[in-house]
Image: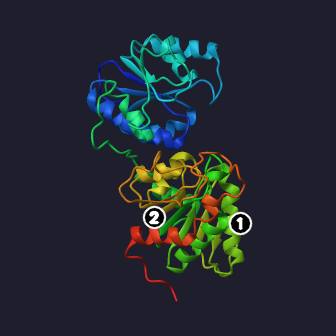
Amino acid sequence: MAGQSQTGQPILIVGPSWVGDMVMAQTLFSILAKKFPESPVEVLAPAWSEPLLQRMKEVSATVVMPVGHGELSLPAFWQLAQKLRSRRYRAAYILPNSFKSAVIPMLAGIPRRIGWRGEMRFGLLNDIRLLDEQRYPLMVQRFAALAYPAGQSLPQTLPQPCLQVETQRVPELMARFGLDLSRPVLALCPGAEFGPAKRWPESHYQSVAEVMIKRGWQVWIMGSDNDKEVGEAICGRLKASGLISNGHISTGHVSTGKGQAQVVNLAGRTELADAIDLLSCASLVVTNDSGLMHIAAALGRPLVAIYGSTSPAFTPPLGKRVETVAITVDCGPCFERECPLQHLKCLNELSPELVLAAIDRLAEPLPVPLN
């Protein structure tokens, strides 16, 4: 990644371990870059996040976390800390609340180490904050507050995440995956790394896809390796419905038989950088509360975000053309990975009609439905 022109002491940020959280952390990066324009912003983060951080103009460099999520290796931490010591950071901002995340900045001798109290991190942090959840109900506010003195009010408007697109890569991606932009693109993101309590049912995604295909749209299903199965299931449902004549599933496509795919399953076929650039081409995105939801919002895409066990009152997508869809249930939001009551009412009873209504509000005027 190309460095920036700042010449002052750099700032180290210990970044989150989840895609969506890392996107929201860009708000903090932006605030710090404005407050300390002479200081490069460097992010200590898992290796997977490098392609994402490379799309944030505020980030000067990525330092790869030497161990995986949940692991603790003091020898590895000590080795990295000695390398970081020579960078003479002015401050470190520790975003995760874990004990582990605060160890490296302390070992590296960074003079100011700022973060929320979390897992009893006395001694590791020397600017330790006590979280007032009522004052900072949103995760993005909790990140941003670390840039200001304790107790200082936040600005009324915070900078929103904004990812850069490598437009020169788009033609190659189109050719590689057999895509075209002759029709508006509905991107479906039916996965969620957190767990099944955030995944809207496949049958509901199928219903939305069918309506939009009839309106003249094409559908791209996007996600990670873990989402390949749900992508294939949605494709199988669309094929079985009879909506797509001569439909077939081979290289991830459900096609018309005329050479142009109506549905393309990209889940598990793209790298993170590919997904960012392809999502930038979407006319509209429908997604669970997931990392791709936050990426789509940071790309400025019209977005319908579906919430089940979690809540938009904590981690909403930070975009200007966004509709969040959720229903009230007596057991939620529970913030559990799996439904404790095994009925998943919060998602099963969230109808496709609610999502289609949100699409209509975002996408007007829509193409005339095909006869």
Is tag 1's residue or tag 2's residue first in the polypeptide sequence?
A: 1
Residue at the (35%, 16%) spot, across then down: 90
Pick the front one: 233 or 202: 202
Dot 1 and dot 2 residues touching (CB under 8 Å): no
Apparent side of residue 256 relative to residue 354 in the rendered image (left or right): right
Q: Quadrant of residue 93?
A: top left
Assess disc 2: are there few (<14), some (14-19) or many (≥20) residues with their C-alpha within 10 Å of its C-alpha: many
Residue 364 rendering spot, x and y as whole percentages: 38, 73
Q: Amino acid at mark 2?
A: Leu
Question: In the rendered view, how is the structure colored?
Answer: rainbow
Assess disc 1: are there few (<14), some (14-19) or many (≥20) residues with their C-alpha within 10 Å of its C-alpha: few
- Looking at the rendered structure, which numbered label has been put on residue 231? none
288 over 64 or under it: above or below: below
Secondary structure of the residue carrying numbered label 1: loop
What distance separates the C-alpha of mark 1 from that of mark 2?
A: 25 Å
45 over 248 or under it: above or below: above
Q: Which residue is identified by label 2?
A: 284
Residue at the (65%, 18%) spot, across then down: 73
Q: Quadrant of residue 55?
A: top left
Q: Which residue is identified by label 1?
A: 250
Q: Amino acid at mark 1?
A: Ser
